[in-house]
Amino acid sequence: MPLGERLGDKSESRYCGVETEFDDDMPQLLSFNISSGGFDFVVSPLMNPTYRPSLMENDSKGSGVLPFAGSDLVLSPSQWSSHVVGKISSWIDLDSEDETLRMDSEIALKQEISWASHLSLQACLLPAPRGASCANYARCVNQILQGLNNMQLWLRIPLEKSDDDAVGGSSDHLVGGEIDSWEWWNSFRLLCEHHNQLSVVLDILSSLPSANSLGRWFGESVRAAIIHTNSFLTNARGYPCLSKRHQKLMTGFFNHSIQIVISGKPAHSLPIGSSELAANDADNHVEGMQRHPLRSYLDYVGYLYQRMDPLPEQERFELGYRDFLQSPLQPLMDNLEAQTYETFEKDTVKYIQYQRAICKALLDRIPDEQVSTITTVLMVVGAGRGPLVRAALQAAEETGRKLKVYAVEKNPNAVVTLHSLVKLEGWENNVTIVSSDMRCWDAPEKADILVSELLGSFGDNELSPECLDGAQRFLKLDGISIPSSYTSFIQPVTASKLYNDVKSHKDLLHFETAYVVKLHNVARLAPSQPVFTFTHPDNSKKKSNQRYKKLQFEIPSDTGSAMVHGFAGYFDATLYKDVHLGIEPSMATPNMFSWFAIFFPLRTPVCIRPGSPLEVHFWRCCGSTKVWYEWCVSSPSPSPLHNSNGRSYWVGL
Amino acid sequence: MPLGERLGDKSESRYCGVETEFDDDMPQLLSFNISSGGFDFVVSPLMNPTYRPSLMENDSKGSGVLPFAGSDLVLSPSQWSSHVVGKISSWIDLDSEDETLRMDSEIALKQEISWASHLSLQACLLPAPRGASCANYARCVNQILQGLNNMQLWLRIPLEKSDDDAVGGSSDHLVGGEIDSWEWWNSFRLLCEHHNQLSVVLDILSSLPSANSLGRWFGESVRAAIIHTNSFLTNARGYPCLSKRHQKLMTGFFNHSIQIVISGKPAHSLPIGSSELAANDADNHVEGMQRHPLRSYLDYVGYLYQRMDPLPEQERFELGYRDFLQSPLQPLMDNLEAQTYETFEKDTVKYIQYQRAICKALLDRIPDEQVSTITTVLMVVGAGRGPLVRAALQAAEETGRKLKVYAVEKNPNAVVTLHSLVKLEGWENNVTIVSSDMRCWDAPEKADILVSELLGSFGDNELSPECLDGAQRFLKLDGISIPSSYTSFIQPVTASKLYNDVKSHKDLLHFETAYVVKLHNVARLAPSQPVFTFTHPDNSKKKSNQRYKKLQFEIPSDTGSAMVHGFAGYFDATLYKDVHLGIEPSMATPNMFSWFAIFFPLRTPVCIRPGSPLEVHFWRCCGSTKVWYEWCVSSPSPSPLHNSNGRSYWVGL
């Protein structure tokens, strides 16, 4: 049964599994661990661990029956697929120097996967690679992946090498030597080309690597974490508990749909009969049933799950958007739909910031002694259905300044709404509606303040610079633009889910497109850095909206190596003086939801290592009918130039 | 006029060019350098070097005429395209910190290329990159390449950084700092994705890098070499000549279709009236014409060209096959055509080796005292049209041994020829023809000697192991197989031409196929290493023809970094004892032409650096209907597994 209920959380991390030994009697195994034990699924060997193909042959012509745990009929199809993860024999070693063992391993691996497939299991757990090389193992798994049904293959990877010989249980998987275990995963998945049915299961031991090193995994395809009983501490009352760092990691797993599996022998002898900590105590009193020896560990994991704060409303709303790639809007070329306006207008935080900025600008521009004599001309360019008009009028009221507003909007459908808004609110004397593209409007007078919100997730990517260049004609020379400037930012990320989604289209176009996306299953590898800045108004002579920026990112030395699948992009805008607005993580405006991040993929992911900086180039290119970005990596090894001439992705003027 | 005539050589390296300054008067420039000067083409600036776009604009509304050298009408279209290579303004610096210079550079570069395109020039010479970074330069060139007509872009790369400030002439191109100039090229072409209209022109100075470092370039797309007058030495009579190492390099260029361009001011003052060295002396006496100031350099280059040995017949025959990818034969699945038999039967060296091997085997098997009592049973399996039958009978005659020959052949068309051969030669008493696949022939007796030639370029790739496994049934337990063993070899190569040819198919299939190819424009980066060995007969119990081999290659430290586009494959076969046959370069059988090398491409080329070994894995996999190879690189960075399950390339059983 699930670990608990959490508002909005329908992820798989509510289910907890247990790793078991081989058992001939699968029904008994399920009954013991699930029906009475309280676990949701078992991770169990399918084949007798003494089996070796090379010994079978000598066994003359036997019955031809492989030593699997029961026939497919011992469980119902739904039991097999919901409750059993197949654990591939752990003696398998495909990169052994011993050719017989290698051959045996290949045969057994293929037999077991074939059996698991036959049973429609959802996943099989592959034993961890052993030595420095895993090429033959990867080759064999890759062959299997080419023809596999929907089953997932979970490659077991120790989070950190075992420095403890007395680990017991499954210690044979935990040989790590001196290599960073992430490198095993990286080699394996590169050899298997990021196959989307291959993912990771992490083995968690008592010692944990650094936070940066752990952080890498949240951008990878991690399905489960196996936590060993001897990773638990003992609390004052003799019950198992986890260190603060382990607890934090578990919360991270819960938040990233990573299932927990408990493994090992009980390492805590509980006071007999005591069960204060058990949340679902009732389950333990099934007549004549013995309490599951790992029940106190399961209870503790359930306790950690239930202890988590419920998801805030905004996050619940955004759950469905997590790591879902969307094409950026083209509000200049296309007209937005009513629904889009509706969504964005709800973002009160954004309009509060605008109102604050307009207030400050009005106060700066009109001294108190001129309040009654001067009327400020404010133009909202790109007025949409009017939220910025409202913010401007409210600012005028708040500051006691006289205001004349022009609301310029190119979308004739939005103009309809604007008209009825003005009528409804009785703004006829203060607001003039102009149905025109700001780039060609012939304004009857010049503006003191130009207010616009033409920003995309990457700041200039919805062509705010080009639009405001057009509007600047009717701004007084000493006029104010709100926003007065905006800057884009990028940072390298591990994002295997996004990479695989882009790859699934099997074309160049999708690899050279930027996407709007609610980043979640992502590892941010280095702080973001500014890319392009635009300032308004800009009265310089040779103004150009073309930009070129070279950036260097260095990952922290305790991260280890990491994979860069692309770049997360953000913006920060200065509306007026100290009033800003933005989504750059370190200074994001709180509780604002109008913008998700933008994601620039890389056609080939780049592996970076501490001490060897990642050099990245971004261009903003302008043609007569479109604006586009090009990007590339030049170091540690040069990538192709992405989106040359805007061949795949561009924003229409 | 061409440097000279060389039997069979129709390559472009017969033509020699000269680099010139900007000249408004193109007809005069051509007349001086070509008609009277003796050069075949000029490499000349198209635009006045004082032009800067940013200055033009200040120049108010001028005529709008760009300062090109003349109009397109001053030369005929064929003169433009045959005699002029456009030299892009050398002041261009697209990676400058100075934004104005960067913008000017981008505009001028695009204008000049556009003009050269308009003139249908065959090529433009791009100035060398300047600093450590060339990303913006590459981005701009890449944009141009996307929409270019057939014109080639030649990127100038100094072979070695200039350590001499007084280089004169084009010294502004030769700033190299501490970086290996190959890295410039490598970054540039990776950013431009190996575009096949982008190639290299090498600047040759007086000092040369190591032979290994030079060797890398012969696998790259090098179109021309610019040799500077001050790279020449002076001979005893005051004439220019080159060092031995330079001479060797020039011969390398000639052999790889790399054109020579002479550049710089004359650095040798010749004795007046002397012209002993000039090979084409007559040309100099055109009435009233002045001798071209670089004529003695041209004459010396012509002398080097003419001095080369003529191409041997075999190489002339193979010229058309150089770097041309062919699919390997499938002689088991398909029947060879008469023409194919015809070609291979002409390879006398191969049959001489077989005859030597059979002789030795007969002498070993039959002591002189038993010559008259014992008849050796020899079976030729895969007899084709009979050349090995003939070799066997000749060996019997040579050694005075009695021989009974079975000629087993599965191709019914070849059996027709075999029959008429036996009749024609009167071999009816010694030769029995069997029209059958050796894998299923029910032999009437067992053989003493089994002779076969089922080898492909990679040894086992035409399924010799599987065929001989089938034939081994009718070999006596102490019988001899000729060949007794064979081993495949691979070595990493730079092969940009082959890579681009594979890439041009734009599919996975061609990147996962091995090709038979006469390697020429290739750099062999490390000695070859053995891969798979098969031994016959093999009486071991658990015989398998599956193989797995892990190899490590280290490139010499004085090579610098290099690009691996794939692996050249070879074989060496032991026919009998010390009689071998093979194409592995270090021990290849001389004058044998039956086999070209095999080439295994990499989907993504791998850059390797000295001190960081290349780790490669090769598998030979066997299914019920086919045999295939899989391969991958695991270090310095893992590649995808190539040809998983033989999805792209396989040999039918």
Image: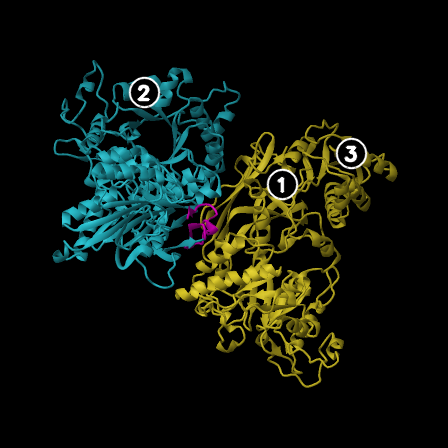
Chain colours: A cyan, B yellow
Residue at label 3?
Answer: B413
Disc 3 residue crowd, few under 14, some 14–19, many 20+, Cα 10 Å: some
Disc 2/disc 3 C-alpha distance (Å): 65 Å
As displayed, is residue B244 above or below residue B116? below
Pointer 3 indicates a residue of which chain? B
Contact (CB < 8 A) between labels 3 and 1?
Answer: no
- Residue at image location 73% in from the left, 74% down from the top: B279
Residue B204 on image: x %, y %: 56, 69
Tell me which chain the residue with mark 1 is part of. Answer: B
Residue A29's disc number: 2
- For the residue labelled by badge 3, is the local secondary structure a helix, a strand or a loop? helix
In-image side of A36 versus B447 (left or right): left
Viewer-side residue, A384 vs B192: A384
Of pointers 3 and 1, the one earlier in the residue sequence: 3
In the image, the segment drawn in magenta is A624-653
Q: Amino acid at mark 3?
A: Asn
Tag 2: residue type?
Leu
What is the C-alpha distance between the residues marked 3 and 1? 24 Å
> In the image, residue B310 lies at what x, y percent?
73, 63
Residue kind at label 1, given as amino acid type: Asp
